[in-house]
Image (spheres, rainbow, N blue to C red):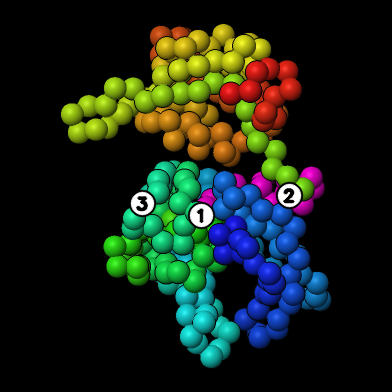
């Protein structure tokens, strides 16, 4: 996690066998709370990667980390077991957030009740096959300890960001040139869907014919209950990927190709 190594003067990686390696910081993405480190060594253990796509609520999840790293005398990591509690969770800044990325947002997160505590950050969340499906990042807690509300960054997003940082040194954000706002909330404060509040002339959204006032129902198959859902979909795209939107009152989905943010061909949002 970016919040683990932020402002560090030296970064060291310790393997379960006790080996220490000085790490080089390749790049960070504070928005997604991801950092990429490099170490040099031979026969290093590699965790098999899975995917967060198709996760089922209730399937097993195992969180790995080292929450007693500053108190325990050994270097062995710890594991806790639970289930996938929810997917596509948007977590906003809160007085009860721990291990937070400077009070920022976590979008489209995996929620698990596997015990996660400060010190688990950056550790993998794995499925029953031992495949990494997420990176433990945050908890919501009134006590400061685990209350069964842990959140992990989907591994698909983390690997896309890592690939960008390794290849180009920066994250290639997707941009479509539209801003959205929530629809009127019901009596319980819930919103259902989002409405376009602004479209930049010459942007992909403008070229596709989207207009302020259009109500968006889904984005790439994900139901939009509020603006954070839309931002979460964009966070998982890179420039050049396609975004498919279902717009209320239109018989066909609107498909557009995202471009780099900010665009050099259109006004900046």
Residue visible at 32% across and 27% down in the picture:
192
Q: Quadrant of the C terminus?
A: top right
The span from disc 2 to disc 1 (Cα, nearest Å) is 18 Å
Element under disc 2? helix
Which residue does the image show at 68% across and 75% down from the upper left?
A: 12
**Residue 190 circle label:** none
Residue 234 in picture, x, y percent from top left: 56, 33
Q: Comparing marks 2 and 1, which lies closer to the viewer?
A: 1
Q: x%, y% of residue 81?
A: 41, 69
- Tell me the residue that label 2 is attached to: 165
The reply to whether the magenta stretch includes residue 159 is: yes
Q: Residue at x 80, y 75 (%)?
A: 41
Secondary structure, mark 1, is loop
Residue receiving disc 3: 94
Dots 2, 3 in contact, CB < 8 A: no
Instruction: Name which of mark 1 and mark 3 comes first in the sequence.
Output: 3
Counting from the top left corner in percent of width and height, residue 47 is at 64, 66
Measure how far apart labels 1 and 3 are at the Cα level.
12 Å
- Residue 160: in magenta span: yes
Q: Left or right: 188 with respect to 119?
A: left
Q: State the image coordinates of residue 132 (x, y, percent, origin top left).
A: 57, 60
Question: Residue 101: which numbered mark, if any?
Answer: 1
- Quarter-wise, where is residue 172 in the image? top right
Q: What residue is drawn where x is 18% and y is 29%?
A: 187
């Amino acid at each position: 996690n970016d919040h683990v190594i932020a402002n560090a003067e030296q970064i060291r990686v310790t393997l379960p066998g006790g080996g220490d390696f000085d790490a080089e910081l390749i790049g960070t993405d504070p928005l997604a709370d991801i950092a990429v480190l490099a170490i040099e060594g031979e026969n290093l253990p590699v965790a098999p990667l899975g995917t967060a796509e198709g996760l089922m609520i209730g399937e097993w999840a195992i969180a790995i980390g080292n929450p007693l790293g500053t108190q325990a005398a050994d270097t062995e990591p710890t594991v806790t077991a639970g289930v996938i509690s929810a997917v596509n969770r948007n977590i906003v800044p809160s007085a009860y957030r721990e291990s937070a990325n400077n009070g920022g947002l976590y979008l489209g997160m995996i929620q698990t009740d596997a015990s996660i505590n400060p010190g688990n950050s950056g550790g993998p969340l794995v499925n029953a096959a031992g495949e990494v499906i997420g990176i433990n990042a945050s908890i919501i807690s009134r006590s400061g300890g685990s209350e069964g509300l842990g959140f992990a960054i989907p591994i698909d997003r983390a690997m896309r960001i890592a690939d960008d940082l390794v290849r180009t040194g920066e994250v290639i954000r997707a941009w479509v040139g539209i801003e959205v706002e929530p629809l009127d909330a019901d009596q319980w404060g819930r919103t259902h869907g989002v409405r376009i509040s602004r479209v930049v002339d010459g942007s992909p959204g403008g070229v596709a014919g989207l207009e302020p006032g259009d109500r968006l129902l889904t984005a790439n198959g994900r139901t939009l209950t509020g603006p954070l859902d839309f931002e979460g979909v964009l966070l998982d795209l890179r420039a050049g990927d396609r975004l498919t939107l279902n717009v209320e009152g239109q018989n066909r989905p609107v498909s557009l190709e995202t471009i780099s943010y900010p665009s050099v061909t259109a006004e900046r949002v």
